[in-house]
């Protein structure tokens, strides 16, 4: 069973950058679609970014488009969320998720994923 663990969160000032990393275990990691979701304080979890199994297709939420990008390295069983021009409203717990079976298109719904990490806190100070 694949497990995923996030890292890279922390406290950053407005306008700053962070790179979140999610590492997966298990030999089937590369077959999954991968996604990033976030849950701001007191709010529902929301989609942030997703990438197809081969890495050729990505989808970015409108709220972060132009500031965030997603990439993966299947040889290292890793997926990354590159965050730039961070704003206080980006403050949230960011979670990595894995799901699907060699999906060619990015998976954007929570129900598409069955493997979730515990999350990493990102706090953007004003």
Image (cartoon, rainbow, N blue to C red):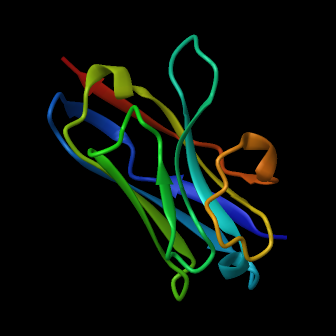
Q: Is residue 31 above or below residue 121?
A: below
Q: Quadrant of the N terminus?
A: bottom right
In percent of width and height, residue 119 lies at: 58, 42
Q: Residue at 66% x, 50% y: name it.
A: 117
Q: Residue at 73% x, 64% y: name it.
A: 3
In this rendering, would 6 be left or right of 31? left
In percent of width and height, residue 18 lies at: 28, 48
Pick the front one: 9 or 113: 113
Q: Residue at 80% x, 73% y: name it.
A: 101
Residue furthest toward the bottom? 75
| Count of numbered badges drawn on the protein | 0
Q: Quadrant of the C terminus?
A: top left
Q: Quadrant of residue 87?
A: top left
Q: Quadrant of residue 71?
A: bottom left
In percent of width and height, residue 106 lies at: 61, 60
Q: Is residue 102 above or below residue 64?
A: below
Q: Is residue 5 above or below residue 90?
A: below
Pick the front one: 3 or 59: 59
Pick the front one: 59 or 3: 59
In percent of width and height, residue 37 lies at: 57, 41
Residue furthest toward the top? 42
In this rendering, would 55 be left or right of 108? left
Q: Residue at 74% x, 85% y: name it.
A: 27
Q: Is residue 119 above or below residue 106?
A: above
């Amino acid at each position: 069973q694949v497990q995923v663990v996030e890292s890279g969160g922390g406290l950053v000032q407005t306008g700053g950058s962070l790179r979140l990393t999610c590492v997966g275990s298990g030999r089937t990691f590369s077959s999954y679609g991968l996604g990033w979701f976030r849950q701001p304080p007191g709010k529902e979890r929301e989609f942030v970014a997703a990438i197809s199994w081969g890495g050729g297709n990505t989808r970015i939420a409108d709220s972060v488009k132009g500031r965030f990008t997603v990439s993966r390295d299947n040889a290292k069983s890793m997926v990354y969320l590159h965050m730039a021009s961070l704003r206080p409203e980006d403050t949230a717990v960011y979670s990595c998720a894995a799901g699907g079976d060699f999906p060619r298109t990015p998976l954007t719904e929570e129900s598409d994923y069955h493997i979730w990490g515990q999350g990493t806190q990102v706090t953007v100070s004003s």
